[in-house]
Amino acid sequence: MKKTAEIKELKFDENGLIPVVVQEVSTREVLMVAYANEEAILKTIETGYAHYYSRSRKKLWMKGETSGNFQKVREILYDCDGDTLIYMVEQKGPACHTGNTTCFFRKLAE
């Protein structure tokens, strides 16, 4: 991937993290939300595959490293405040650990 903006424009929280909304590039469907630190973002740019920071395991991880459900990142967007990212991805297999296509398969209200 080619970097077009500086990471210094991003606003990380007090733990050095920034939320990442993940969307399927072809449908724009929201697949999941995760967190990234600067290292995860740089690794994503370097490899072209989505990397995140696990808050529970306190370590970097690549989506699909155990499941095989990789995310090829086509574009990284950031919002007007610089405090949220969107990874536009080509998802291989389901995005959710439950086996669902997206993590957003349950309804709270209608």
Image: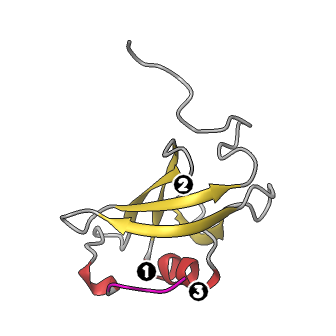
Q: Which residue is mark 2?
A: 25
Q: Residues within 10 Å of mark 2 (few under 14, many from 20)?
A: some
Image spot of residue 26 (x, y percent): 57, 50
39 vs 30: above or below: below
Residue 38 disc label: 1
- Nearer the N terminus, badge 1 or badge 3? 1
Boundaries of the magenta span: 1-5
Quick one: SS at disc 2? loop
Image spot of residue 89 (x, y percent): 57, 59
Q: Nearer the viewer, residue 34 or 6?
A: 6
Locate residue 77: give its quadrant: bottom left
Q: Which residue is mark 3?
A: 46
Image spot of residue 8 (x, y percent): 28, 86
Marks 2 and 3 sit apart, C-alpha to C-alpha, by 19 Å
Q: Mark 1: which amino acid?
A: Glu
Residue at 58%, 67% (x, y): give it: 73
Q: Decide if residue 25 is on the left or right side of residue 91.
A: left
Q: Say whether residue 24 is magenta.
A: no
Q: Is residue 52 shown to the viewer in this render?
A: no
The number of discs equals 3
Quick one: SS at disc 1? helix
Residue at 55%, 82% (x, y): give it: 1
